[in-house]
Image: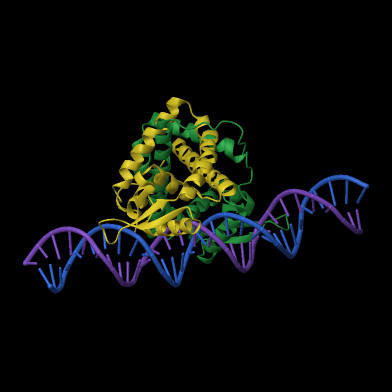
Chain colours: A green, B yellow, C blue, D purple
DNA sequence: GGTCTGTGGTTGAGTGTTCAACAAGAGGGA
DNA sequence: TCCCTCTTGTTGAACACTCAACCACAGACC
């Protein structure tokens, strides 16, 4: 962090946008998480993992890959998968061709839990986000966010310590 | 949660936007939090609280008001303020005119910590978000996010249980 | 005055996340 | 083959957050 260069302060309106973004994100995530929890005993991070698994060949992904996909630390994914395994939603298997490798696999039960939960989640995203933007606005949101992702996830290519 | 009505699934492109938003938010928050922590031993939620306090008359806000401003539960704010108090960054005082009331006050030391931290934070917001949107795009982001906030925070007027 | 209900704030236990340290296999070069 | 280093995944302790229960005061109503 270079302290010799001038810090570019935010204008009042930029500040206002930033706070809206912060507030909206806090409320939105909180709400989606709460809905999933009460209806399906699943947290947002858990749900995200299930979605990735369900879309993958064999419903199975290597731990490190999974961590990269959801931008969590390897440690965090280990803990989360352990929890999901205890609930019978995923299973661990030895990855072929790499003695260190472990893959998480979505069980049939896990898949049906996900099918249910998806309704809750998608409705929430619609009602609390999509509804409030025109298609054009939504597209702008997507473009900006995509640039943010691109620039951030190969800067610190490993968010995991 | 009404299970009789049809769930409005997301189109492929909506899904893509949603994932970008999710990914960007995860990476961005993580990065800003990490930078604040390593440079100033402060978390994002802590920083947000300090900002609110610093802008308030007497650098002091009632606990419940503070909780509402940053959209956290009262319990969470209690814990956070306790932590900040232990570090000498804020102090608790009895609120006047209400026997139950407690206000958090930013200390001089707290103010100077905030002054330092603000550089780090603002630079981060600039480099990782503002830079990647044109003024028009940024304005769109603000409008959409503001609508999301409006609709979510008087739906569940108390995010606190 | 008394009770009743609602709000403000705290507490402690349970849960999830981070962080640093670790074991074990992979892959390279001498 | 023997190192050396990097990657993979796990572990346990420390830390942060959630949740439900709780006490104390405020305000209204009788």
Q: Outermost residue, front direction?
A: B108
Q: How many marks?
A: 0
Q: Residue at x 38, y 54 (%)?
A: B104
Query: What residue is shown at x 46% (from left), y 40% (from top)?
Result: B18
User: Which of the two residues, B89 or B47, is positioned nearer the viewer here?
Assistant: B89
Between D9 and B114, the one nearer to me in the picture:
B114
Location of residue C6 (image quadrant): bottom left
Instruction: Locate residue B138, reporting x and y percent.
Output: 44, 30
**Residue B8 seen anywhere in this rendered image of the structure:** no
Q: Position of residue A58 (x, y in %)?
A: 59, 52
Give the residue displayed 52% in from the left and 64% down from the top.
A88
- Frontmost residue, A79 versus B72: B72
- Between residues A58 and A8, which one lies in front from this camera angle? A8
| A42 left or right of B124 in image | left
On screen, residue A73 above or below A89: above
Tell me, yes or no, if residue A144 can be seen here: yes
Picture quarter containing residue D22?
A: bottom left
| Residue B23, percent from left and from top | 52, 43
Specify the quadrant that holds the N terminus of chain A: top right
- State the image coordinates of residue B128 (x, y, percent, origin top left): 54, 36
């Amino acid at each position: 962090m270079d302290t010799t260069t001038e810090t570019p302060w935010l204008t009042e309106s930029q500040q206002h946008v930033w706070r809206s973004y912060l507030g909206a994100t806090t409320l939105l995530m909180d709400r989606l998480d709460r809905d999933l929890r009460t209806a399906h005993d699943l947290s947002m991070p858990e749900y995200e993992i299930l979605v990735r698994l369900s879309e993958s060949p064999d419903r199975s992904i290597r731990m490190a890959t999974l961590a990269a996909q959801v931008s969590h630390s390897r440690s965090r994914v280990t803990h989360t998968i352990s929890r999901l395994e205890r609930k019978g939603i995923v299973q661990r298997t030895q990855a072929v061709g790499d003695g260190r490798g472990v893959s998480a696999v979505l069980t049939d039960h896990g898949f049906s839990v996900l099918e249910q939960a998806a309704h809750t989640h998608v409705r929430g995203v619609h009602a609390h986000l999509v509804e409030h933007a025109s298609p054009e606005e939504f597209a702008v949101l997507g473009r900006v966010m995509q640039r943010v992702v691109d620039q951030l996830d190969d800067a610190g290519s490993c968010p995991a310590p």
